[in-house]
Amino acid sequence: MKRQEIANYIKKHIDNGAKLQGYITVGYGLKDMYEPSESSYLNGKKQIRYVPLIKITGLTYDVELEYINAPTQAELPKIIQVNAVDKIKLPEIKDYISVYYDDNNKRIDGDFTVEKNMKIIVKFLNLNDTTDTDSDGLVDVLEELVGTSLTDKDTDSDGLSDSFEVFAPVYNVFNPLIADTDSNGINDGDEDYDEDGLKNKEEIENKTSAFDKDTDGDELEDGEEVYKYKTNPTKIDTDGDGLDDFKEIQLGFNPLVANEKFDITYAPKIDNDTVSPSVKITLSGEQAQSLSIEQYDNEMLFPKDMPGYMGMAYDFNVNGSFDEAVISFGFDKTNLPNDAEPTIYYYNEKEGSLEELPTTVVGNIASAKVNHFSTYILINRKVYNKIFSWEEVWEDKNYNKVDIAFIIDDSYSMKINDSEYRRLEAARNLIDKLPQDSGIGIVSFSDSKPKLHTSKLTTNKSEAKKFLTTDYFTSGGDTYMYTAILEAFSLFDKSNKDTFKMMVVLSDGETYDKNLKEDAIKAAKNKDIRIYTVGLGKNSLAYFDNYLKPLATETNGGYYSIDKAENLNEVFKNINKKIDITLDSDKDGLPDFYERGIHLLNGKTIITDEKKRDTDGDGLLDGEELKIEYKYTPDKKKVKVTGKMLSYPTQKDSDEDGDLDKDDPHPMRYLLNDRFIDNLGKLEKLSKEYYKEGIVFFDKYTVSKNKWYVFMFLRQFNPSYISNKWSGTGGNIDTKFVDYVKSQDEELYKYFATKKEIYANKQFETLDVYHMAATMTGLIYNTDSLDAPYFKENSNFFSALIKSNTPQGIVNNLSGWAGDLQTLMRDLKDRIYIKKEAIDISTYENFYFYLKNMLLSKKYSFSKEDMYADIDAYNINNKLKKKSIKEVFEKHYSEGYKKRFTNFLGTKNKDKLRDEVYFYTYQYCIIKMNNFNTKWPLLGKYNYKTKQSKAARDVFVDFIIAQREKEK
């Protein structure tokens, strides 16, 4: 600095009253403020002389301090010296914050430079003082900081209270010191921020939210309720009859007049189906509120190509019981054949069956009376019933193995009835179809001594078949059938109880040993051997009825009578079916016959692997996934067989919800996180047992406290969510309840202790369970002045805000998405100042670029798992007041998640969302006027430029809006 510039600088401040600080000494040479002499001696050398050395150490002003409300024990200076142009550093006292005035009592900023001698009045404000002189919801401490009147609730007279404007959860939209904040010619109170038909000041008068079109969540906008329907916009059910205002209007009732009963005709709007369901029913208000008809979207159970399909199935639901209802399905007759029989069927989920209801059809409406609700579907009965046929009854016991003896007539008469030995061909074909380990015996009979071609049962099919040739059968001699049967019993001596033992007896005429008939029947019964008899020819029918048929009927076998040998193959095929129906070769619980194909209740056919116990490899036997159902005629002589699908034995995850069938409590119902939700229901039950609700403390919990217990229990498994901050926003951990759960159901405790993630969508992306639970406790728990001490570790000022009853929505958002977004902003700064990364985030574009790439990354504080957790917690919380946790989760993870971002946004447009988000990304917390600023605790570590705060806002808003567009 040049000598003259320094001199002018000194003179300016001395003229202002500054004191010159420094000293003068004698030194050698020319130094400091004096330039070196240009003089020289005659010999050319520089002049050297002693000169005065002036050392100026500073220019200072005296600042006189006067104190108001200073603690008596505090030692405070009355005068301090401050260097010119330096910022003043004033005394600080724990639990106090200061505001400053000049000697004319004008409010001044504490962050200013001193340029003259002056007097400053320091007023200490006690952060523990909750006095609110004008009862406007803003404690005097905050009024002093903001600059609003302590005695006037509406300092700027715009119709909005000071606290409303200060705590508005949007950035810089309302200023309690300016009547028209946005300078558009309309006072803040006369504007309609949420565009619901009520002015902002009318929102205050009606105790509604100026930031939510539908304060009470009944699907009617606040303006509609006040001016059109005259209903209470803060009460879902204005007349208190149990049915909310929206539904009363929707169903044609008066929401201002209470009804004891409602005669309802309800038909939901259906856009994507060929049938339209409806119901007529009389219900109480509470029941009417729960009435719903929803599509049962299960393509596996009711595919569009099932026989007789006319349209989708529908779930009819209502809480409690009722006497009678008429359910109806409208349908399009255009493509139906004239003989179609539209019929309503009831899906009996417990039995896995479709049960036909007595159906009346008038025009294009099919109706049926019911006395309970379930799932119903309209089917063309004529087509559907063709799939299922009645069959002969047989024993439904399953065996692991089959032992079979062929007792075949080789008498002379066979030359006439089976000259081409078709009986041998049919037997060989049957042997080929037997399981590999089957025991096979071949016996021929003609004269009194039968021939046991196999001395014992053989499992060698080729060995057995070689005896079924003309080398061993010659068709000569008389008929001694019963003797052959009695001789053949010896072949079964080593058969065990898990083996299906049978004989196939074929004969064409009368036997000479009829006297042995009863002996044969008795022996067969004692050895548990079924006898299947075949009578060949048409000249011996009476004999067949008397001597072949009893063998079959008395031993639970089967009897067949045919005219021609050409039909023997068909008979033996039928016998093979009986074997397959009875035999379960792979011991999976399904008969071999039905593994090759069985009709399900929807008319479709499923095939499993008869040689593999667990076809799909999901850990469940085929017979554990598919049960055989038998429907008998009244006389029990005929049966209709269908497969009851418990889960698909050909798919590891039948309902494709991410849970393997063996782990899924409802494997045929699409529901993400099925087992998790079932266990939540168990946990909720325990919470009700533990907490017997008496007085409901709505000032501390927005829903029943037992629901808070459930989420608190989950939250405590992550140590990050048991800090003071979380105690303040989500309530203290109740270790007694945690111990109670462990003592009552240790398996349930262990399940949740390790269940860190659940599925977020059908793509099986995940969300953080404990994070969601923490956010849920923050949403349920009402933070108030009693919780202020928990926040002192972050900021005395933030603690004061809590004491001032900061609107709960602000604390809620900080417990969820807003807190995560602020932490992500801090993460980005950490990359520069802690991790020392060489990145430039000084511009809007760069800050946006880096933050966008960090959003959803597991490396940082706002991962995709956290995002889903925050958004789902917000949406689920909105539904918890009237339904159990299990019900809400079931609804959300079957359908609700598909519209998660749409539901999160609600009625907000992009501009409104930007206002709300910027409230949190702007670094200063709530109070940001009259030269006073304090940072959000999570943003306190660094400074954020306005363009950086806007970039953070836009990253989040752009993501949310983009996700909503994808959901359309």
Image: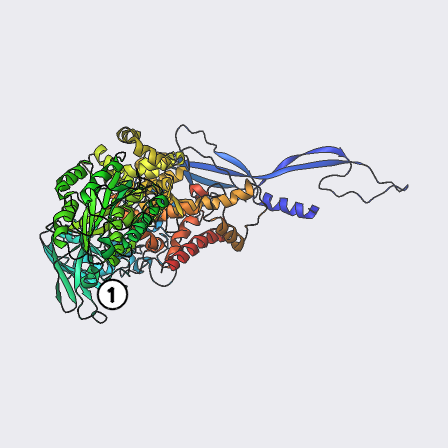
Q: Foreground: 303 or 75? A: 303
Q: Nearer the viewer, residue 587 or 824?
A: 587
Horizontally, residue 630 falls left or right of residue 659, namely: left
> Residue placed farthest to the front in the image?
477
- How many numbered markers are drawn? 1
Quarter of the image that includes the C terminus: bottom left
- Let me know if residue 253 appears in the view: no
Residue at image location 73% in from the left, 42% down from the top: 34
Quarter-of-image position of residue 128: top left
The quarter holding residue 302 reads bottom left
Q: Nearer the viewer, residue 356 or 632?
A: 632
Q: From the top left corner, tell me how far across and down residue 85 is, in percent.
A: 56, 44
Q: Amino acid at mark 1?
A: Thr
Q: Residue furthest right?
A: 43
Q: Residue at x 28, y 63 (%)?
A: 272
Residue nearest the observer in this picture, 227 or 538: 538
Locate residue 404, reporting x and y percent. Answer: 27, 43
| In the displayed structure image, the side of residue 846 where residue 27 appears, left or right | right
Q: Secondary structure at mark 1?
A: loop
Q: Is residue 723 above or below residue 297?
A: above
Q: Position of residue 954 (x, y in %)?
A: 45, 55
Q: Which residue is mark 1?
A: 274
Examine the rendering and report whether any part of residue 711 can be seen.
yes
Q: Compared with residue 552, is residue 726 higher up or lower down, i.e. above or below?
A: above
Left or right relative to 822: residue 802: left
883 is higher (above) or lower (below) than 328: above
Q: Dot 1, crowdedness within 10 Å: few (<14), some or many (≥20)?
A: few
Could you tell me residue 362's position as x and y percent?
12, 67
Question: In the image, what residue occupies the spot 78% across and 37% down?
Answer: 29
